[in-house]
Amino acid sequence: MKLRLHLAVLLICFPLIASAQNSPNFPSLPSEVLSNYSPKTPQSVTPEVMAEQAAKFLGSLNDELRGQAALSFDSPEKSQWTNVPPRGPQGGVRLGDLNKNQLELASDLLATVLSPQGYGKARGIPLADDRLLRDGERRPGFGAEDYWLAIFGVPSKSEPWGLQFDGHHLAINLAFHGDGMSLSPTFIGTQPRGFELDDKTIEPMAGKDAAALNFLRSLSDSQQQTAILGSERGNLVAGAGRDGVVPESVGVSCQGLNEDQTEAMMKLLKLYVGDLPEPFASRRLNVLSSEVDQMSFAWWGPTTDGGDYSYRLQGPTLIIEFAGQNLGGDPHNHLHSMYRDPTNEYGAKLGN
């Protein structure tokens, strides 16, 4: 079972962490593969292709590792994910226990069931974690080797199954059932905000703050006054360990948004929903576009570029949250976000 840590413990431990923006060497084989390997992806993503790729990955494992990776569809581990650094055995197989071929197949799988945007997060967040050091040294529970991949049920083009990829600052929960696919719940965070790799800047959560600020600024003065609920940044309400929690709908109603405002909101939604591959992302966005009038948008904190703020966009089948974190000393360099469809957690309504 995954070990849950209380926030009080985190407050003691995390301020000691310093961010090393540039790591000259690969601290682990998963780090090397994630840094250098270009995953093989199909021309089109179908239920059959995703199931085949999952089966291919499982087929590369020996009995011991397969026993860790392949869990029953209704395994309690599915809901035991956490965004804090692991401190003990997790559900799934640990990346640090895989060889190069198996890691490449795991990357192929993730790049198949996620869009390029989504895979960028699945790749970038573990690599960002490599850059979290204490006194120049890495610690157990931090780094790309301490992420876990689990398959729930038997991968199938027609029957329900699931996939979970999680570790520090990351919990991607995918559910599949025929032509249906769910991304809920998914936690995306990062520390540091960005880092350099092969002369490129990698920012796993790029745009999630700026797009929300652009949406806020598209609102009228009166709408903004209703949306802004406090002068200080809040925190996630429906994060890890909060399955089934639906916060009160607060802030400004999105009913009657004009064309420019709706476009700004949809750009924000795509930064979350767009982690799904096509055509599943477009299908989900079409559902959400039909629910705009029932959504609300709330803001806490300043409205300046680079401000320390948080927000929530909520509707009948949507909870999106974003907030910086004080742990580590710089809330701009330590970000958390959450995506949920409270009606379809772990694919609850797929196939219905």
Image: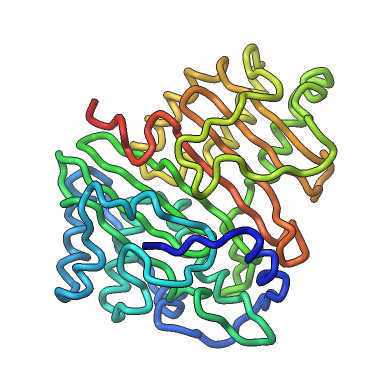
Q: Give the color scheme: rainbow, by chain, secondary structure or one colour.
A: rainbow
Q: Quadrant of residue 71?
A: bottom left
Q: Quadrant of residue 202?
A: bottom right
Numbered label tally? 0
Query: Does 204 sit above or below residue 218?
Result: below
Q: Position of residue 325 (x, y in %)?
A: 70, 56
**Residue farthest to the top, as pictured:** 256
Viewer-side residue, 209 vs 167: 167
Where's the C terminus, which quadrant? Answer: top left
Q: Position of residue 26 (x, y in %)?
A: 50, 84
Query: Does 337 sit above or below residue 57?
Result: above
The residue under the point 37% across, 70% down is: 89
The residue under the point 66% across, 27% down is: 297
Q: Position of residue 340 (x, y in %)?
A: 48, 38
The residue under the point 37% across, 78% down is: 96
Q: Position of residue 200 (x, y in %)?
A: 60, 69
Horizontally, residue 167 falls left or right of residue 98, namely: right
Viewer-side residue, 115 vs 66: 66
Q: Quadrant of residue 348?
A: top left
Where's the N terminus, which quadrant? Answer: bottom left
The residue under the point 59% across, 59% down is: 6
